[in-house]
Image: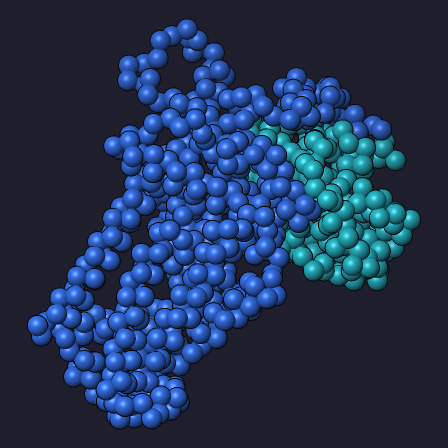
Chain colours: A blue, B cyan
Amino acid sequence: MPYLSNILFAAILIFSISFFVKNVKKLTRNIKLGRDVDVSDNKSQRWKNMTMIALGQSKMVRRPVAGLLHIIVYVGFIIINLEVLEIIIDGITGSHRIGLKVFPLSFYGGLIGAFEILAVLVFISVTLFWIRRNIIRLQRFWKSEMTSWPKNDGNNILYFEMVLMTLFLIMNATDVHFQGMNSGNVISQFIASWFGGISGETLHVIERTAWWLHITGILVFLNYLYYSKHLHILLAFPNTFYGKLKPKGQLDNLEAVTKEVKMMMDPNVDPFAAPAEGTEGDMPAKFGASDVQDLSWVQLMNAYTCTECGRCTSQCPANQTGKKLSPRKIMMDTRDRLEEVGKNIDTNKGEFKDDGKQLLDNYISREELWACTSCNACVEACPVSIDPLSIILDMRRYLVMEQSAAPVELNNMMTNIENNGAPWPYNQMDRLNWKDE
Amino acid sequence: MSELLKVPTMAEFMAQGKQPEVLFWVGCAGSFDDRAKKITKAFVKLLNKANVEFAVLGTEESCTGDPAKRSGNEFLFQMQAVTNIEVLNAYEVKKIVTACPHCFNTIKNEYPELGGNYEVMHHTQFLKTLLNEGRLTIAGGQYKGKRITFHDPCYLGRANNVYEAPRELIQKLEAELVEMKNCRRNGLCCGAGGAQMFKEPEKGDKDVNVERTEQALETQPQIIAAGCPFCNTMMTDGVKAKEKEADIEVMDIAELIANAQDL
């Protein structure tokens, strides 16, 4: 059976990719559960944002240590993946280091040498990340929402990367032919010496094992993404593209409300008129958001993009002063609920069956929502253009406009505005009194 | 003092068939809050001094709707917005200046979609322009050499990327501008935004304004400068909470410039 390994490889590859595609479909389906929103404007600015923020990591480096380490891992990830291309071709065709046949030795050696150096740098960076998380225990990684799965997820990713980098180097170190060429083995030559005294045959077995573990590891990692916060490596790009372009202080005006208000202000409108034919569907089912389907698809994509780094939460004035609100938790809750809704749809043959739960109260408490100062620190801090404030505002809208459930003092404030045009109970006729005081 | 203030209204301008150069949007705090009224008057003194033909809406002004919108009451916000826009458009207002970053943000960013298109400036930007045009001079006076730290209002800074105008004005006072650890886009909120001004904070282990005041105190300032009536209140309360009110003043930039010239 000379083709056994080729067939096995192809089978693993096809299985991994189809499983991944299946989950990507689920992911897109879930995101599309959100309200439609027009983000087709200003394409050039959007491309620029994506290039700067996602590709260029411009916001990551605002925290220089994490930013630098992240760039190393990010560049390493992209470049080392060129090697995966060779591995896949080798795996399918049964060739060994096909690159050697295509490129001159010096070029191939240069490439592999660069990969090896990056692999070491990535390994070091990831180790430092792990130390920051687990030994130094940076505060933002130990907030109350960072227990159980989110905590393990963060570490799993780091272990994955450590193991993958190690396997890559071992694979090169135990490749007798590759070491013999003495080109590109800048790092692995030193590792090769650890394997001195081992017979050629055993070395070959080790090399093959490392090769197989490396590629299956990558494929497992690919499929791990959907279950992990690590989805940001893909979604950071569309997310920064579709991120908010307007000034941060500008919150959207609800169109449905505008229609109502314009009608109220227009003396020519007949208040008892039946709605025009075909416009019944124009009114939203509700104002604001109590569940994930009430949010826009961009907000839902935000939730899947969040990598739980916690920069938002560490900048949040409410969180810094011990309040329950954590913008990161808002995003994590949104994703968790969206996943729950998605599973509900899967088990009920494509239709959502009311499960008696919603994003509000079951996930995000009112106490959290009312603690927000709308200061935009979380939005400013996010390295991938996530807007937690927009979700908080939409949920407040639901509480106020659908449930009249604002805190008493805010109701007083709003009554004052309604009655006398100021948040305090002063007469509008006294507005200019300051002039003569 | 008050008899010296010239505060014409839009109605008066209209009666004379004239248009002012700019409308001064006073805002609710600037109209009713005792502390903020002082800021309003200081700014008017500067406008008078620079011979700016401005007008106020007076009793025709109403809340922009900012706290309602940020509380989630979009309905009330838009009612306020549409009513205000009707008044502003009836007077054919083109340019608005305000000393409140919340009014500034709302009128500048959220009114256009509802039919209100104006050039909107924060008073620090406006004063900066007057200075550049040579219509206003700024002298250090009593603030020369004083240590002043500037607290960025969220709705001026992060919300609208205005960071430099207030700082340039402080520097014109020949004062020593000292920056807090968290400034400009990293500035910490005073705790008043998002309608928090009008309610008790949620349970926590500290008040936001105290946290921010502590950051300001780290710079050992003689004055904490603000550019927002709500920040001003929050920081003043913070200074009191730290029992520093005898040593440290919280002042709006307009007040600093007016006081420096003994206006």
To which quarter of the image does residue A142 belong? Answer: bottom right
Determine which quarter of the picture holds residue A135: bottom right
**Residue B137 x/y as whole percent:** 76, 53
Q: Nearer the viewer, residue A397 or B7?
A: A397
| Residue sitting at the far left | A1
Residue B144 occupies which quadrant of the picture?
Answer: bottom right
Q: Is residue A180 visible?
A: yes
Viewer-proximal residue among A320 and A148: A148
Q: Nearer the viewer, residue A136 or A403?
A: A136
Q: Residue at x 52, y 67 (%)?
A: A129
Residue drawn at x 43%, y 62% is A157
Q: Is residue A286 left or right of residue B16?
A: left
**Residue B100: x percent and y percent?**
67, 39
- In what quadrant of the picture does the C terminus of chain A appear? top right
Q: How far from the left and from the top, in percent, is residue B67? A: 62, 31
Relative to B261, A130 lies left or right: left
Indicate whether A345 appears above or below A206: above
User: Residue B26 location in percent, x, y?
Assistant: 69, 33
- Residue B139 lies left or right of residue A152; in this view the side is right
Q: Residue at x 84, y 62 (%)?
A: B145
For residue A158, above or below residue A150? below
Can residue B154 be seen here? no
The quadrant in which the N terminus of chain A is found is bottom left
Residue at horizontal 39 percent and vertical 24 percent from the top: A284
Above-or-below relation of B189 to B2: below
Going by the picture, which residue comes out furthest to the right?
B246
In this picture, is A317 found above or below B25? below
